[in-house]
């Protein structure tokens, strides 16, 4: 895997996710990761077969099955993943039965290839065509898995940006609400003071009216007294003459 460090890291990361989903019994996540598992394991197995053929050491169908089974075991066991990543595997591995059953609906488990009947040979041309078709299909699935991963990451970034924007808008709205409440409190205090001033003015006006009425009554009484005194004086003056 030194030639494909990105795919190797993708397989290790995928194994962590599958083990976590297996522990959480998350069926939806198992199905999604299972599709990625099927595409990535197939692509890596095909890559290993091509490298062996390029090196002049073609591998059999049985060995191809062992490669796929080992990759599934790497996904299931963190210790196997570490040994595989460092190139220290001493023998082919088999995935745990419980683990493979948990993702069976998402990832078809590798099955031992049917051995051809004795005496029968596969035609080289048809075999090459079949391998090419399978390789193209696996690469298509791997490309789709990578696109899905990028799309998921982009969606996560977009959601994070929307979250930050919503938080900023919430803070602005809370600040505006606080300022509006302060203005409303100030206006309420001013209204209360104005009402008190109006009541004071009403009281002062009432008291002034009452004083004016009392003064008017006193003035009337004084006028009447003065008129009576004048009349008495005239009468006395007439009598003395």
Image (spheres, rainbow, N blue to C red):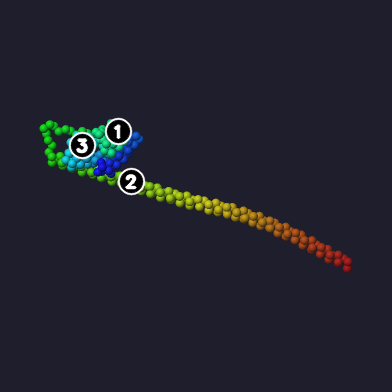
Q: Is residue 224 left or right of residue 22?
A: right
Label ID, residue 64: 3
**Residue 27 lies in quadrant:** top left
Residue at the spot of label 1: 99
Q: CA distance from mark 1 to mark 2?
A: 27 Å
Q: Position of residue 138 (x, y in %)?
A: 23, 42
Residue at the spot of label 2: 153
The mark nearer the N terminus, 1 or 3, is 3
Q: Residue at x 62, y 53 (%)?
A: 196
Q: Position of residue 68 (x, y in %)?
A: 24, 36
Eyeballing the image, is 216 above or below 42? below
Q: Residue at x 68, y 56 (%)?
A: 207
**128 and 31: which is toward the camera:** 128
The mark nearer the N terminus, 2 or 3, is 3
Mark 2–mark 3 CB contact (< 8 Å):
no
Q: For mark 1, give the secondary structure.
A: helix
Q: Position of residue 165 (x, y in %)?
A: 40, 50
Mark 1–mark 3 CB contact (< 8 Å):
no
The mark nearer the N terminus, 1 or 2, is 1
């Amino acid at each position: 895997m030194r030639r494909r460090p990105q795919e190797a890291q993708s397989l290790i990361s995928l194994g962590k996710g599958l083990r976590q989903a297996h522990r959480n019994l998350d069926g939806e996540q198992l199905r999604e990761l299972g599709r990625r598992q099927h595409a990535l394991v197939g692509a890596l197995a095909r890559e290993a077969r091509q490298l062996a053929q390029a090196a002049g050491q073609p591998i059999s169908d049985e060995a191809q099955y062992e490669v796929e089974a080992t990759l599934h075991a790497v996904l299931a066991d963190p210790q196997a993943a570490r040994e595989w990543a460092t190139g220290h595997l001493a023998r082919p591995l088999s995935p745990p039965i419980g683990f493979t059953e948990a993702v069976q609906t998402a990832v078809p488990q590798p099955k031992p290839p049917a051995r051809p009947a004795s005496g029968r040979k596969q035609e080289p041309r048809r075999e090459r065509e079949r391998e090419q078709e399978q390789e193209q299909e696996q690469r298509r699935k791997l490309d789709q898995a990578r696109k899905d991963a990028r799309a998921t990451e982009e969606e996560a970034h977009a959601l994070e940006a929307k979250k930050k924007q919503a938080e900023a808008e919430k803070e602005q709205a809370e600040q505006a609400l606080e300022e509006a409440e302060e203005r409303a409190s100030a206006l309420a205090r001013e209204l209360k003071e104005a009402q008190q001033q109006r009541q004071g003015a009403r009281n002062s006006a009432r008291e002034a009216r009452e004083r004016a009425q009392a003064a008017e009554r006193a003035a009337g009484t004084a006028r009447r007294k003065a008129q009576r005194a004048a009349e008495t004086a005239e009468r006395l003056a007439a009598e003395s003459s």
